[in-house]
Image (tube, helix red, strand yellow):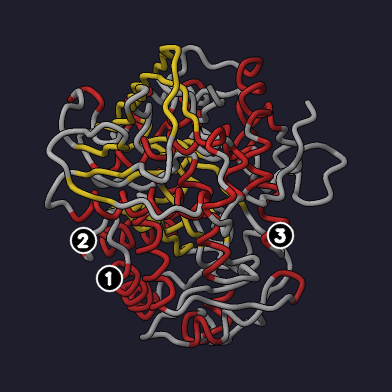
Amino acid sequence: MNPIIPLPVSAVETGAAFTLTDNTTITIDANNDELAAIGGYLAGWLGAAGGWELPVTTAAAPRAGAIALTLSGADASLGAEGYQLTVTPEGVVIAANRPAGLFYGVQTLRQLLPAELEGQAGRSAQDVNLADWTIPTVVIRDAPRFGWRGMMLDVARHFPAGGVEDVKRLIDLMALYKLNRLHLHLTDDQGWRLMIESWPRLAEVGGSMAVDGDPGGYFTQAEYAGLVAYAASRYIDVVPEIDLPGHTNAALASYPELNCDGTAPDLYTDIGVGFSSLCIDKEITYQFVDDVIREVAALTPGPFIHVGGDEALSTPEADYVRFMTRVQQIVQAHGKQMLAWEEAARIELAPGSAVQHWHDEMAAHAASQGAQVIMSPAAHSYLDMKYDDTTALGLNWAGNVSVEKAYSWDPAAVQPGIAESAILGVEAPLWTETVRTLEELEYLVFPRLLGIAEIGWSPAAGRSWKEYRVRLAGHAARLEALGVNFHPLVE
């Protein structure tokens, strides 16, 4: 059986095989548009790889020779994202309680097929070698350990050179490994990357440059909404971040009235942190925050708006607490919950608010308030850290993060005082101070992101670097077929 990442909860091979042909059909439950979309997704992938047009039809029960996607017959203990995949010589059945589980079962089915098929888009059916389409018979029962399995992409320091298409490429690769959150860091000192209609200069001025004076850019609201919808079709929620009250030079340069002295600073193209702050005592500051959160919330179906809160070194403690408390109220007034970096635990967190751990013990203080925590320890999960001292890209302020180090940690053992029950899940951030192109992004992200995906999905018991590195090596061919510019596994 081909290696599967993330490692399933259980997989039992039964010793035979099923072979797909151009007569294979995909069946789904009747009267379910969401299942029809998943069936179409699978048919599209198989069709691109094999040159076949596999029909998607409805069926009350699995048919011989078919791939059946059904919401009937799954064990309730598999939850909303779990699935059971059964391959027999007669066909394939993926059963789940919810459509998300079926989608994740489809990703496992992809990984059971030969990796080379990932790169066969565009070939004709006459070129198909049926031996390529053999799947070992197996029964897989699988469900995630954590509900939040994410990656953060900083588009503020450098805006993606390929814009929307680069982000869609990343979404597709995340989906293959069952990740379900894309945290977009949309604003920072160096750039504001989302058009806010009520404050257009944020994007027009604040989004005009990037680190080192490189070209800027921003998403229109239509482009952002399109990304949200595209991600949702892959069962990924987009979590937008508007970083406040520090990391705000791009906003301050766009509107003088947001500054305490009424004077706009120059645009900022270096990478230092901690020098900027909104003017806490001005009422226009809160009108600005309210307008921005209102527009972002309207574009974002998910429950969370991330409001930063980190490295506000130029904001006095009392001002920070007063400001973040009011921001939390603004977020909730627009029907969302506040997510922030762990420094926000300095305020009284409202029910439903959550924090993201990255470097200190403040997340434990949040947990003591009853808040949930996303684990993103910089020393293990920051994808912008160098692999080793020879890596040209990336930084190393949190130390080098090898492929092994990115895999060899347990979210429930990182910080004392944070019980597993308080952990929403895991997230791997990529800050883009040194990242200018999609190829550079992929090099820092892959293959480390696969390890983060497994940490978020697979049970802690049974995971080991010695075993994982063998499966990871087996995914090199899949990443190559997908054209991913990944760092080679040399450890």
- Disc 1 packing (10 Å; few <14; some 14–19; many ≥20): few
- Residue picked out by circle 2: 335
Is residue 452 visible in the rendered image? The answer is: no
Image coordinates for residue 229, horizontal then vertical, percent: 35, 64
Residue drawn at 56 percent across, 46 percent down: 128
Mark in front: 2 vs 1: 1
- Residue picked out by circle 1: 298
- Outermost residue on the front side: it is 126
Mark 2 vs 1, N-terminal side: 1
Amino acid type of the residue that numbered disc 3 sits on in the rendered structure: Val
Image coordinates for residue 109, horizontal then vertical, percent: 43, 35
Q: Nearer the viewer, residue 284 or 5?
A: 5
Image coordinates for residue 175, horizontal then vertical, percent: 45, 46
Q: CA distance from mark 2 to mark 1?
A: 9 Å
Dot 3 lies on which element?
Answer: loop
Say if 114 sits above or below 200 in the image: above
- Disc 2 packing (10 Å; few <14; some 14–19; many ≥20): some
Mark 3 vs 2, N-terminal side: 2
- Residue picked out by circle 3: 435
Dot 1 lies on which element?
Answer: helix
